[in-house]
Image: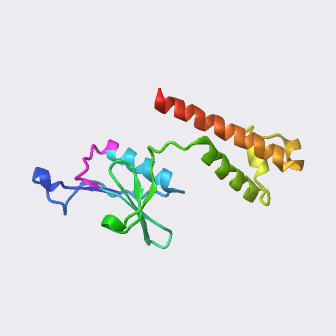
Amino acid sequence: MWGVGNPDFGQSPFELVAPVEIVAVCDFAEASAACRAYIAEHELGGGNWRGEVFDNRVDLVATVSYNGRVWSPESGADSKLLYDPYRIVDQQELKDGVEEAVSLMDDCDVWGWLEEFGICAAGDYADPGAASGKLLNHLLADIGAANRVIYD
C-alpha cells in the first residue's frame, strides 16, 4: 500500500505522501480491511490511494479501490469484482458455503479447534453432522447479528 501525490491538488503523482507498507493477509476481506485502515491512518483521498494485492510469488492478483472493493488486476471493463465489503450475504448462500466448507473439514483435524472456541463439544467428533449443524448455527447467528447492525 502507498499514498502518492494527487494531481488535482497540484501534487506530483510520482512522490509518496504516505509510507509504503506491506501487510500479509489471508484473503481479500483482510486485504480490504488493511487498506481501509491504512487510508484512514494516513488521511488519504481517492486520488492519493494505491493498493495492490500480490501472491507469495509477487504476482499481482488484485487491486483494492479507495472504497475497499477488491478487483481483478485487469484494467477498465475487463476488471471483475472479487470482494465487496458492503455486500450483504443472504443466509441461504452462507448456509450453502458453510456446508461445503464443513464437508471439506470432515477429512481434516479441525474439530479440536472448533471445540477450543466452544463451537462444538468433544462428543460431536463421532457425529460430524451434529458438529456441522452447530458450526452452521453459530455462523448464521453471527451473520444475522452483522446484518442487524448494518440495517439498524
- Considering the image in quadrants, where does the N terminus appear? bottom left
Q: Quadrant of residue 140?
A: top right
Provide residue 39's location: percent of width, then percent of height: 33, 47
**Picture colour scheme:** rainbow
Q: Could one spot residue 116 in this view of the protein?
A: no
Q: Main secondary structure of the magenta part?
A: loop
Q: Is residue 73 magenta?
A: no
Residue drawn at 50 percent across, 69 percent down? 56
Q: Which residues are magenta?
A: 40-49
Q: Position of residue 12 (x, y in %)?
A: 14, 59
- Residue 137 location in percent, x, y? 71, 38
76 versus 111 height, above or below? below
Q: Which is nearer the eye, 118 or 88? A: 88
Report the side of 25 relative to 101 (left or right): left
Q: Nearer the viewer, residue 18 or 27?
A: 27
Residue drawn at point x = 83 percent, y = 49 percent: 128
Q: Nearer the viewer, residue 87 or 70?
A: 87
Residue at image position (24%, 53%) is 48
* Residue 118 as seen in the image, left or right of residue 34: right
For this orientation, the residue located farthest to the left is 10
Indicate the quadrant where residue 40 lies.
top left
Q: How far across and how far down the image is residue 115, in percent? A: 78, 42
Task: Based on the picture, tell me whether residue 47 belongs to the magenta stretch.
Answer: yes
